[in-house]
Image (cartoon, rainbow, N blue to C red):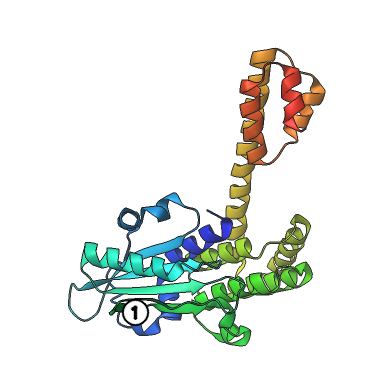
Amino acid sequence: MGIQDELWKDVIESLFPQFLHFFAPDLAQDVNWDKRYEFLDKEFHQIAPESAESARYVDRLIKVFLKAGGERWVLVHVEVQGYWDKDFPRRMFTIFYRLLDKFAKDIVSLAVFSDARRSYKPDRFTWDFYGCSLEYRYRAYKVLEYADGELGKNENPFALVVLAAKKSVEIKDDEERRVRFKLRLMRELLKRGTSRDEVIGLLRFVDGIVRLSPEQERLVYEELHREEEKTMPYVTNWERFAMEKGMQQGMQQGMQQGMQQMVLEALEERFGRIMPRLSEQIRVKADQEGLQKLLRLALRAGDLEEFEAHAGL
């Protein structure tokens, strides 16, 4: 699953009430938020195993209770679609009838289209064959259709998630604008008078979806740290986010160093002491996929010359 897909899944889970209030306020106002809502990932993958097996789908299934009806609960099915797919409406219908068959509960289906194709927003599946027909309609939303100004003024924090997703598409080829936008939006997020966990969830999404070069990332963080020195009220939120980001990067670096060491040990075990030049070339190899390839090659190569010939170092 891609980085953006994971970001969407995580932010929907961490900010689900805000998500529902933004996209489906009519439903959200009837939900009994005093009762615990539940993400039914296991159950969803049972009726849609292709979602568990494929990296193409961003889908969530949530069980919520309504204010009316005491213990009455319904299902909310959410799909975030980031690319054009002519079969998407059929998929929505297929999931709907599988859910209806399994749970026999009312279902609300929401499709959020986050791709760059403005005209792509299918909202129904139709079928007609020799006098037999059906039409299944679901709620469809296009990220690019929302106005920047309205999103910026919206007090619901999920509006800033939508704004970040929108701008990540619109200015993806203009890094200077991405730098200005990311700095402005992260500053706004840090100022928000919302819970700390909510702010951290928002920061994580924005940081991941608005991608910058390492140098530009450093400039953004330095600017935020300079503002920190002015004792702004959101310092604790920024510190916690920066700490989490640093820990994640440290873990990633640790994994890379461990993989580098495994490659070196495999070569030394099979072929004896290796030249410092080759050792250094392996140690500067940073990407995880490349290191995995080197480890497989180190275990299979007939000799050191064969390893070097195919390693691409």
| Residue at the spot 70% in from the left edge and 12% down from the top edge | 272
| Residue at the spot 41% in from the left edge and 52% down from the top edge | 52
User: Where does residue 183 sit, x and y in percent of width and height?
Assistant: 70, 70
Residue 257 visible from this viewpoint? no
Q: Amino acid at mark 1?
A: Glu
User: Where does residue 216 sit, x and y in percent of width and height?
Assistant: 76, 61
| Residue at the spot 35% in from the left edge and 57% down from the top edge | 48
| Quadrant (top left, top right, bottom left, bottom right) of the C terminus | top right
Residue 21 visible from this viewpoint? yes
Label 1: which residue?
Answer: 135
- Quadrant housing residue 298: top right
Q: Secondary structure at mark 1?
A: strand
174 sits to left or right of 148 = right
User: Where does residue 61 sit, x and y in percent of width and height?
Assistant: 35, 64
| Residue at the spot 76% in from the left edge and 25% down from the top edge | 308
- Quadrant housing residue 238: bottom right
96 sits to left or right of 207 = left
